[in-house]
Image (cartoon, grey):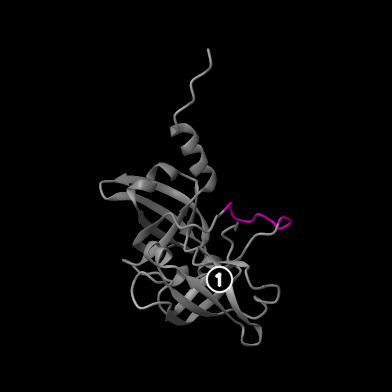
């Protein structure tokens, strides 16, 4: 479990195929910021751009760790298949502050950046989400974009999906990879965990009441 509050900016240094074809995943070697790995052990969970991954190798002296990403995860996420900057968050502890919102680290779909421009002292990010996620998104609801917990300022259903408008303050831009986004870029989206359960409870067939 995570909160969507990024613990540090990392970088994918090396990607290595785990097999001979697309049925196999890739092993990634990542660089972490100073101190990030001090309390990390093999088998721990770290969210990389919002996708929960397991630490399979540790080189603390070099500030590096490795993860194995399955072919399924590569198919359903973005930003995990090539070298580049990534958002990192360690798993939530029971006594930690819940600074963002409840995040599972399971990507629900890929969004596409439609606009990204300065508005006053902040920036407005416009993302087109898949239509299948529209029922989980609402004004002032929470959404995770590349692992970052954000608040939806406006939502509009369109023929080709659901458009979200999100305000990003300078601190967010300076401490995550979101400041590097460009129009047309893909992003990992995770909808609010509570909304997921509410939708299931409302849509599931109810058992017949015994006579």
112 above or below 84? above
| Residue 96: in magenta span | yes
In the rendered image, which quarter is residue 88 located in? bottom right
Q: Is residue 185 left or right of residue 34?
A: left
Q: Secondary structure at mark 1?
A: helix
Q: Residue at x 62, y 69 (%)?
A: 43
Q: Residue 68: horizontal and vertical position, in percent?
A: 50, 72
Q: Residue at x 39, y 47 (%)?
A: 133
33 above or below 62? above
Q: Which residues are magenta?
A: 94-102
Q: Residue at x 43, y 61 (%)?
A: 188
The main secondary structure of the magenta stretch is loop
Most extreme residue toward the left is 159
Q: Is residue 36 left or right of residue 185?
A: right
Front residue of 155 and 23: 23
Front residue of 179 and 206: 206
Front residue of 66 and 181: 66
Q: Residue 123: horizontal and vertical position, in percent?
A: 44, 63
Q: Residue 60: horizontal and vertical position, in percent?
A: 65, 83
In the rendered image, which quarter is residue 15 located in? bottom left
Residue identified by numbered label 1: 175
């Amino acid at each position: 479990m995570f909160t969507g509050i990024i613990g540090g900016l990392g970088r994918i240094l090396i990607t290595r195929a785990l097999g001979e074809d697309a049925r196999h995943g890739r092993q990634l070697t990542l660089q972490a910021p100073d101190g990030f790995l001090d309390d990390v052990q093999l088998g721990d969970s770290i969210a990389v751009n919002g996708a929960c991954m397991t630490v399979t190798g540790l080189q603390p002296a070099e500030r590096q760790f490795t993860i194995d990403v399955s072919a399924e995860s590569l198919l359903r996420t973005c930003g995990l298949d090539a070298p580049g900057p990534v958002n990192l968050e360690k798993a939530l502890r029971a006594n930690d502050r819940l600074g963002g919102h409840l995040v599972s680290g399971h990507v629900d779909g890929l969004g596409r950046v439609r606009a990204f421009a300065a508005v006053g002292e902040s920036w407005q990010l416009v993302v087109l989400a898949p239509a299948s996620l529209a029922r989980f998104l609402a004004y002032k609801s929470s959404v995770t974009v590349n692992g970052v917990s954000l608040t939806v300022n406006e939502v509009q259903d369109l023929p080709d999906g659901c458009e979200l408008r999100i305000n990003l303050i300078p601190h967010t831009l300076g401490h995550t990879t979101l400041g590097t986004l460009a129009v047309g870029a893909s992003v990992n989206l995770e909808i609010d965990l509570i909304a997921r359960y509410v939708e299931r409870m409302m849509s599931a067939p109810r058992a017949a009441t015994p006579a």
